[in-house]
Image (cartoon, coloured by chain):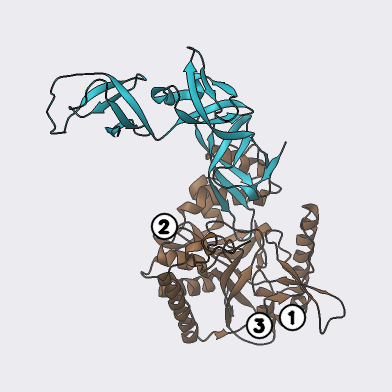
Chain colours: A brown, B cyan
Amino acid sequence: MKFNPHHTSWQPTASLEMIRSRAQLLTKIRAYFERTQVLEVETPNCSSYATTDPAIESFQLTYTGSGFSSPHSLYLHSSPEFPMKRLLAAGSGAIYQICKAFRNGESGRQHNPEFTLLEWYRPGFNHHQLMEDVAALINDVLPKARTIEYLSYYEIFNQHLNIDPHQSTAAQLKQCAKQHGITDAERLDLSSKDAWLDLLLTHCIESQLGRNCLSFVYDYPASQASLAKIRSGNPPLAERFELYIEGMELANGFHELTDTNEQQRRFNQDLKQRGAQSQPIVPMDKNLLAAISHGLPDCAGVALGIDRLLMQISEATHINKTLTFPITHA
Amino acid sequence: MASYSTNEFKGGLKFMLDGDPCSIIENEFVKPGKGQAFNRVKIRNLKNGRVIERTFKSGESVEAADVVESNYQYLYNDGEFWYFMDPDTYEQVSADATAVGESTKWLKDQDMCTVTLWNGTPIIVEVSNFVTLTVTDTDPGLKGDTSGGGGKPATLETGAVVRVPLFIQIGEALKVDTRTGEYVSRAGK
């Protein structure tokens, strides 16, 4: 068949102005970390291990050749968290990285399966101190600094839906969804209470967060701790936070878990859930477990979506406008 | 019956919802970084035209709707049904008043239109954006007034009434925009 250049969309989806704007943003971020003495690092994109998080699917690939007697299975990382924690355990001190992260199955207005993450760790910080650090960085790079609000996970559910996210049952959350305009909530077959919380958060609350300000949401249900420390109490709460601007989730941070046994327990629990939901079973990162057991310093870490931050700066309504070549054009 | 996964969702996809054929207007992938993924969809019910919002768990499947759009020629109306013919196969289909809806105002014998069929039965009849129709009645006075402005009502051969400039006379063929119901120009010869 004859090649016809008119039948391909070879051109970038980002304008040249956007491409320049991204370069400026990265320069400003690097300047911020230089000023605050955080070291830029690089870690591999490929690993023999993958995230066990049931909400995230990794891309799998195969290395064949020198160094391995048989084809070796590798995963593209979904965030550089594990190797960066290994650096922290090795005594790196505060570090940051700007890299591509990869998540299978995520494509839409705010998602591209390959996206740019800024991830950083501050030894000695808890999640509250890190939220302030995040706010300082964001206000440094936004065209106009925004006021900052801090709301607990309980507060946002209580304010917007008049419901207690920690004490409510899945049935009560389903009822709440129906009352708040999700007419087909009855039909939705969600596997856990957390999925109902996610439904309410994404459909009924998110759009109200970060209006003309930076909204930090903190202290998540222990069941959504991911890799955050859980603070005992009634209820026990995960020392985790998210940042929202104009209804968009921009960053997720933890007061990091530093307990090997607990980390292993969560990996196993994730894998059990993966099994129950017929999701691929992936190998848990033994290097991370070894590093934590050697001694991960008390620290807080956060991952921030650069493409989404660029959407905010440029008022783009689709992530594709910030990317040179999104998945459909790559 | 064929089915679609939410991964295939995009504008224009037709599927069955609560027993009615529907078409996707807008599909949004919604997912917290560490949580459940959803597809939040704006859907048009093709039977009654109503637009609703629905949420699906990503990965869910829906039943495909046997909906096809084809060009048909309008033949006649027997008082109860409107009859259309496929110009290639000469096969005829009949549409009821619900399916024809507002299009009845612009339907003229022999004109081509787009018919949406669900399981072989017409559910939507759409006329062209522009149709040419003859004026059967309008106030004949004020001939020579070409100042525009104001205008007057004119009844067309299909019964539709549109506002036309004062110089338009009975028997003239007019081009009309069916989306707005507005006069465009005299039909060029």
Which of A252/B170 is in front? B170
Nearer the N terminus, badge 3 or badge 2? 3
The disc at residue A211 is 2
Please rate how many residues cluster around mark 1, counting C-alpha atoms within 10 Å: few if below 14, some from 14 to 19, many from 20: many
Residue at point 34% right, 25% down? B133
Which of A299/A188 is in front? A188
Location of mark 1 (residue):
A291
Residue at point 65% right, 74% down? A81
Looking at the rendered structure, whether the residues under marks 3 and 2 are on a common chain is answered as yes
- CB under 8 Å between discs 3 and 2: no
Q: Is residue A165 visible?
A: no
Residue at point 42% right, 71% down? A16
Q: Position of residue B29 (x, y in %)?
A: 58, 52
Residue at point 67% right, 48% down? A193
Nearer the N terminus, badge 1 or badge 3? 3
Q: Chain of mark 3?
A: A
Question: How far apart are the two marked residues, 3 and 2, measured between alpha carbons?
Answer: 35 Å
Location of mark 3 (residue):
A88
- Amino acid at dot 1: Ala
Image vertical order of residue A181 relative to residue B174, above or below: below
Q: Position of residue B111 (x, y in %)?
A: 44, 27
Q: Residue B102: which quarter of the image?
A: top left
- CB under 8 Å between discs 1 and 3: yes
Position of residue A321 in the picture relative to residue B177 (left or right)? right
Image vertical order of residue B173 relative to residue B33, above or below: above
